[in-house]
Amino acid sequence: MYLVLVGGGNVGIQLAKRMLAKGHELILMERDPKRAQRIATVIGEDSVFLGDGCEIATQKAVGFARADVVVAVTGDDEDNLVVCQMAKQLWDVKRILARVNDPSHETIFRHIGVDLTVSATGIIEQLLEQQIADDELIPIGALSRGQIEVVEVRLSQRSPATGKQVRELTLPPQTNIVWIIRDGQGMIVDGSTVLQDEDMLVAVVPSERAEELRLLLKA
């Protein structure tokens, strides 16, 4: 599968790393030269393209015409919308995904035919509205026909994970902690992230491994 990612922020980098690790062909587009150079040291020069993902010339250069999937994950909804619209109408890309920073914009993205939108703000809002006991593992969604669960858990001082870096945790196979809500603010997770008391974790875990994750995080 050939993927084009537009946007070299943390979301784009982490997604690129995971997709490359699975053996997919991929190009990540970033228009800031210094950032593009830093990204190249992480995922390799061959997987980074310096250029504006909203421009026809750069889209042609990276191969939008043959892309199986285009993913727009910049921090600007207008840029993401332009990328998606051009991918759909100009290059006839079959599968288009987008990050939506303002949940009120999701309707616009769906209207132009974006297959999937992800709004971190919307997820955070839903999580904050729920009253959840410490260390309780709560399923909030299912993927791949129920074989994978999206779960959330709030850490307490008693949790074995509190005070540890994510890389120190022995997570169940195919499990990833993808998001943390701390003091009302969402943050992306990497291996050096130190978990704190009252952190709300959002994780993706195979359904049959959910209990293992609960035991790891629950006091």
Image: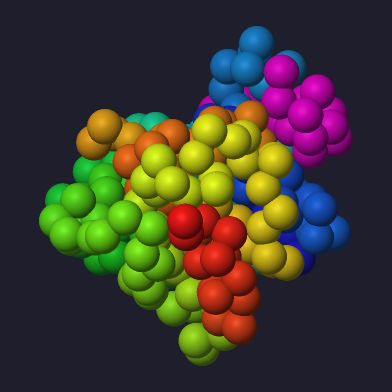
The residue drawn where x is 61% and y is 71% is 212
The image shows residue 134 at horizontal and vertical percentages of: 31, 55
Per the rendered image, the range of residues in magenta is 38-53
The image shows residue 67 at horizontal and vertical percentages of: 67, 59
Q: 186 or 21: which is nearer to us?
A: 186
* Figure label count: 0
Q: Is residue 13 above or below residue 104?
A: above
**Is residue 42 shown in magenta?**
yes
Look at the image and tell me whether residue 212 can be seen: yes
The residue drawn where x is 74% and y is 32% is 48
Instruction: Name, please, the residue furthest toward the bottom.
Output: 145
The image shows residue 179 at horizontal and vertical percentages of: 45, 46
- Residue 39 falls in which quadrant of the image? top right
Q: Is residue 186 above or below residue 103?
A: above
Q: Quadrant of the N terminus?
A: bottom right
- Residue 68 falls in which quadrant of the image? bottom right
Q: 114 or 157: which is nearer to us?
A: 157
Q: Is residue 4 left or right of residue 142?
A: right
The residue drawn where x is 38% and y is 58% is 135
Q: 83 or 33: which is nearer to us?
A: 33
Q: Is residue 145 above or below residue 32?
A: below
The residue drawn where x is 61% and y is 83% is 208
Q: How is the image coloured?
A: rainbow
The image shows residue 113 at horizontal and vertical percentages of: 36, 67
Q: 51 or 44: which is nearer to us?
A: 44
